Image (cartoon, coloured by chain):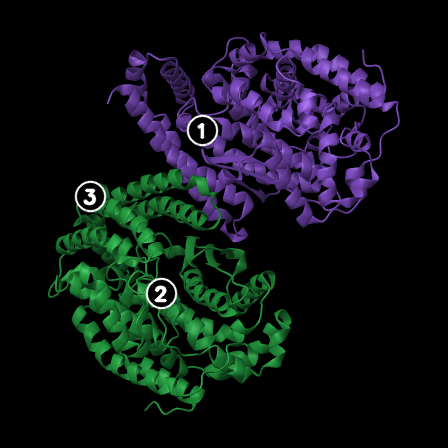
Chain colours: A purple, B green
Amino acid sequence: MNAIEKLKKKYRWIYHFQSALNLIEWDFETHMPRKAFEKRAEAIGTISTFVFQYLTSDELGGLINQAEKEARTDEDRAIVYFAKKDYEKQKRIPPKLLRKFSEETAKAQAIWQEAKEKSDFSIFSDQLEKVVEIVIEIAEKVGYEKNRYDALLDFYEPGMTTEKLKGIISPLRKFLVEAVDKISSVEKPEDIFKKYKFDMQKQKELSKKVLEIMGYDFGAGRVDVSAHPFTTTISHNDVRVTTRYDVHDLKNSFYSTVHEGGHALYEQGIPEEYRGLPIGDGASMAIHESQSRFWENIVARSLPFWKFFKSIIEEYFEVFKRHSAEEVWRASNIVERSLIRTEADEVTYNLHIMLRFDLEEALINRKIKVKDLPGLWNEKMKEYIGVIPPNDREGVLQDVHWAHGTFGYFPSYMLGNLYSAQIYYAMLKDLDFEKEIEIGNFDRILSWLREKVHKKARTREPDELIKEISGEELSEKYFIRYVREKYSDLFSVSLL
Amino acid sequence: MNAIEKLKKKYRWIYHFQSALNLIEWDFETHMPRKAFEKRAEAIGTISTFVFQYLTSDELGGLINQAEKEARTDEDRAIVYFAKKDYEKQKRIPPKLLRKFSEETAKAQAIWQEAKEKSDFSIFSDQLEKVVEIVIEIAEKVGYEKNRYDALLDFYEPGMTTEKLKGIISPLRKFLVEAVDKISSVEKPEDIFKKYKFDMQKQKELSKKVLEIMGYDFGAGRVDVSAHPFTTTISHNDVRVTTRYDVHDLKNSFYSTVHEGGHALYEQGIPEEYRGLPIGDGASMAIHESQSRFWENIVARSLPFWKFFKSIIEEYFEVFKRHSAEEVWRASNIVERSLIRTEADEVTYNLHIMLRFDLEEALINRKIKVKDLPGLWNEKMKEYIGVIPPNDREGVLQDVHWAHGTFGYFPSYMLGNLYSAQIYYAMLKDLDFEKEIEIGNFDRILSWLREKVHKKARTREPDELIKEISGEELSEKYFIRYVREKYSDLFSVSLL
């Protein structure tokens, strides 16, 4: 067996432990009895440490170096390229620092929980400062060229820099702030999804139905309930989604399901033989998010979708018969100046991200202090979205991410939206999107995504991938065009 | 840290992987999408090999030897005793032989499945012969004093021998064959549990109710559905049971739930600080089975139980109002000359086991040949139970155990029944069993079991445990007494 084959074998071996971890974490969120919390956290700690130690072991490092000399095919070269990149990056973080990170973020989550419940940022402030200091230390260890924040961005969106991000954000923010102003000036449509009471069991059946229609393979997956919807991959043929149900809010469960379904289709589309190897994942967090957003917003919040799907949803909820497809479409696209990111519509959503990016980047570069966050948060909310949170809970304390120490992650959500629009306009060149959706032919759309995105998995960096798909680098202009076209139609306002 | 503390730490570390395996296997049986089968089997293989290698490593062996010198308390001495025993036993099996065992039994299961479907033993015969040869080799490696079968028995019921078993079986079989004859001469009661259609959802709620009443902690467990009911422990506070439901058969689901509940109470009662250590399990398979059988048969098939529980079951199934507590009690204790072990009543059940023991012991000692099994099976069925299977499916092919290679396991079921009766008569000395049950006070019964059985976990061998509980060695006489008293009452026949 040559080194490259040995390397693959080792990755597939350690992947079995990673796969076990994914299942354990899935169970943690969906089925675990409450008293099991502590022991489960210990088991997760043991197994993830074991996996990390193996992935940073000299044995693996040596094998990667040997394999590098042997790689001949594109595939093998990609495996070695990403193996080496991941290995070197992980090696730069001292195990002691990583342990400190785990311990302090675990504490931070508990403290954040309490602070959020009491809606008092001051409870969280000291611990967050500790986390920020550790994250700064990690960024320094990992290294960067220009901006310390780049080291963090690179964990989630390889190749992305603060400079590039600012170049994207500047015109996008200007456009979005104006768009929200204009849209806010017209009358808000009636929210059909919150007008009635929607039976839980029926919502569950509807979730399965819409996933089936999208092309999700239930022979290789399942849907469960969790507090926060997510998608996880246990193995190639075991990609699970979760969602949540609220009898007074069909929109949340329905679009959460479609969103997670988008992630799951990506995972189910990654070639089986790649799974477990460094190339056997999504290309990046943002590319992953582009797939969920594509299905959630571009497909399932389109007029042709509701022309097709209205007769189906009526089988589950008769009340939809009282409304036209256009009305449902409008209801699914209500734009609001709202406080909570996770509930934001697609027009305001990126503004929520920009605010977080501004604060994160300033924190990591020590331009602002942790204790100033609540004031700055509220100022930016006023400036970007036009509302001021009445309290910390609905303001600076709303997201768990900082307690998790995942600085640099938020921009992926925005980039995912931008990628999805850029992919959409590339798709329009090849097929009649509206027509296919209106007749419920999702096959061709999924096949296109499989070919252009899913099958490529992580065989190249995200910037290469988007160039191959669309012929150019990531740009905000496609998202702007998408919002302009869609919302001009929706609300008869001019967004030029 | 001294060697004993180091040893405990190591066991708790590797237990996290064992715990992951248990969860993976639970998921395999309850939630896994069907296409995930192959990859899941691979992951189970990888992780169980990893655990086995650690448990037979020189590192662990060295630590056990060091710890042996340091053990001062009873607890530490027990830890070292069982650690050493398990280690040495496992070390005696060459890894190559173990791998052959895994491979050939995996094949055997698939072939057995096919043979059972086609009801044709000849399809299975050759592969079973291979398995038997491997098991004989394992027994030879493990070693024994008098009878090769003793080496296998010792895996499941440490200290048990063929000679002891035969001494128990001989009087018990004589008694049971006569008892079945006498009981068969009186009219069979009406089977209320199969007379009506029982709503699935209600059955599920009833399962939860009865487990709650028994004292099962739902904060530290849950109930799911699987093809074959089982109990598994993921961690001290995560003991899960499964059951199955059939709208035309309430007896099966109800008593499966109570049976698994008995196992689960044992697991939930093992001291948390023992978990992961060699003393942190049940004392043996048969002691475990004694707990499930105690709740299933001695508690939940008693007249006082139905006097108490009838008004509760009526809340789920109104039809029970049409029957008296006595009628339900009789229906729960129907004795039949039946073909299938898993559906057998408590009087005939041990006869099914004796038949298997006879054949296993003869096979392992090469006194009979695999190809002669179907004929011998049918002869023994006629002799012990008085019926002859019309085909292999309902005869020699009914159990998966031999395909699994778990020769020596079957007697545990019978021994569990005997232990449960012996424990029952010991309990009667301390509390008014009938009265407590009739008023639904299961607390005192559970507390007694906790004190005498559960808390002891595996700090001593099963033969010591039963002596401590009952003052004497395991004997068939208590089970005989139990059947005699109960069934004389039930059917007004004299079983003296």
Residue type at tag 1: Leu
Task: Tell me the amino acid under the disc marked 3.
Answer: Pro
- Is residue B195 something one can see in this rendering? yes
Residue B457, given in percent of the width and then of the height, sits at: 35, 63
Q: Position of residue A38 (x, y in %)?
A: 49, 47
Q: Secondary structure at mark 2?
A: helix
* Label 2 sits on residue: B288
**Chain at numbered mark 1:** A
Q: Which is nearer the eye, B263 or A363?
A: B263
Quadrant of the snapshot with the C terminus of chain B = bottom left
Q: CA distance from mark 2 to mark 3?
A: 29 Å
Protein chain holding label 3:
B
Residue drawn 42% across and 45% down?
Answer: B24
- Position of A377 with respect to B310 (left or right) is right
Q: Nearer the viewer, mark 3 or mark 1?
A: 3
Q: Which residue is identified by label 3?
A: B95
Disc 3 secondary structure class: helix
Position above or below: A240 against A265: below
Circle 3/circle 1 CB separation < 8 Å: no
Mark 3 and mark 1: Cα distance apart in space: 36 Å
Both on one chain, marks 2 and 1?
Answer: no
